[in-house]
Image (spheres, rainbow, N blue to C red):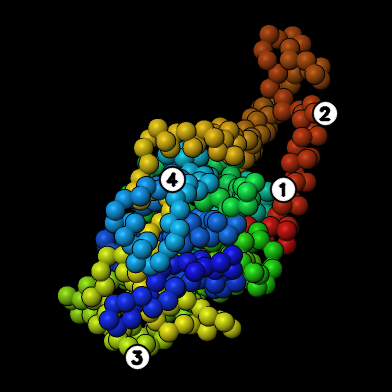
Amino acid sequence: MADDTSIFIGASRKPDDSYQRAEELLLRYGNRHGLITGATGTGKTVSLQVLAEGFSNAGVPVFCADIKGDLSGIAMMGEGKDFLVKRAEQVKLDPYQFQEFPVIFWDLFGEQGHPIRATISEMGPLLMSRLMNLTEAQEGVMNIAFRIADEEGLLLLDLKDLQALLANIAERADELSARYGNVTKPSVGAIQRTLLVLESQGAANFFGEPALRIADLMRTTRDGRGAVSVLAADKLMMNPRLYATFLLWLMSELFEELPEVGDLDQPKLVFFFDEAHLLFEDAPKVLIDRVEQVVRLIRSKGVGVYFVTQNPLDIPEKVLAQLGNRVQHALRAYTPREQQAVRTAAETFRPNPDFDCATAITQLATGEALVSMLEDKGVPAMVQRTLIRPPSSRLGSITPDERRKIIAESPVTGQYDQVVDRESAFEMLQKKTKEAQDAEAQAQQQNSGGSRWTIPGFDDVLGSGNRRSSNRQTVAEAAIKSVVRSVGSSVGRAIVRGILGSLARGR
């Protein structure tokens, strides 16, 4: 049975279907990443739930997406249903204890959990281009836009900031083309139209402040258990590109913010990436290469990444090679591609002479899986046909009232509820435009030969009832603009972007 150095997953079976041994995930190899695959309805969500419970009890915070709503049950005490009790007896789980786990619910739309946001500056040009499905030429313009924003100290917090910057770029197209290469107004216009579509799909809820603090995903309770952050993703899945880009950004933020820690006795955080095929679907090679690099390097930050998908072919080979802990549920093999998937899955396991792996994959029952975890010295264990243990928390979704109660009692209640709209690129560019217009009006007035006497600091013009049109700055205005200029120039020098283009803090 599992102890405080491992997570009990289930029990493997002998060829005669009798009990063989307990199958465990060693916590010291929890950051070596993992894979949970299988056809719809074969038990992937329960395997995810069992692993999340085990990590939480070990004091490891967990982040996972709830695609269908049934993972939310991890927040409530389990119930002794007959089939669960029977499975507990089959895997020799004694005593079979029920638990509720410390859960923080999140939702990009703020409806089924705390709002979760990022700024466009944090997202970076690569992920924004991926989110908007831009062409190569449009992606070039997006890179130029972020370069200008970084150099000129223009904060890109939300969609209106990016729209304002793109409009400014269109006006300066000739000037910028001489500095950065061809910047065409049609390309800028196409990006602006894509932004409008993105806004209509609800992405505006995601971009803004207060932005998510990574520390809030790494909380532990007073009794030492890791918090389970559950992202409500049923509505989010209607925009799969936003879902995949958000999780990519989150993985990138973890990589950029967390310090190097090497191999620990257990991970600092475990990240479950459900519907992982969306991450790689139609993704350009440069993005896949960088994701592979992040997956390879984030291990040393103490983060374990577990991909959950139907088909092992959904994961690029270079990424697949990084995934040491594997749970393979049943696959169907009706088409040539499905047959290829079965062969691929079978070939990734260390063979077991007691059975043919490829045949077993097509014959697994619901709640049964082929399991291979890393053993001592990080060597993959021989694959075993395994009955997955029943979860200790509720199997299935919670009620809306239960969800509201958990959200109200959450440790982050009130921190992300109110949107903060501070001065950023939109306001700064508006101010520059107004100053330019005022300067032009004054120049035209001087050229026309008109002259007026004014007293500085007063609005009335001597000899006239008109308001003053001078753009003369007050002392306070001059001080503010000086600060903005100094901040802008220092931001331009200090900004460094990481592997996936997000802001690399502290570098």
- Secondary element under disc 1, as helix, strand or loop, is helix
Query: Label 1 crowding class (10 Å Cα cut-off): few <14, some 14-19, many 20+?
Result: some
Can you identify the residue that label 3 sits on? 353
Can you identify the residue that label 2 sits on? 475
Could you tell which of marks 2 and 4 lies nearer the N-terminus?
4
113 or 397: nearer the eye? 397
Can you identify the residue that label 4 sits on? 77
| Residue located at (67% from left, 54% from top) | 151
Could you tell which of marks 3 and 1 lies nearer the N-terminus?
3
Can you identify the residue that label 1 sits on? 488
| Residue located at (38% from left, 35% from top) | 400
- Distance from Cα at disc 3 to Cα at disc 4: 40 Å
Write down the quadrant of residue 135 in the picture.
bottom left
Report the mark closest to the observer, 4 or 1. 4
User: Whole-percent x and y of residue 174?
Assistant: 55, 55
Quadrant that contains the C terminus: bottom right
Q: Amino acid at mark 2?
A: Val
User: Whole-percent x and y of residue 38?
Assistant: 31, 68
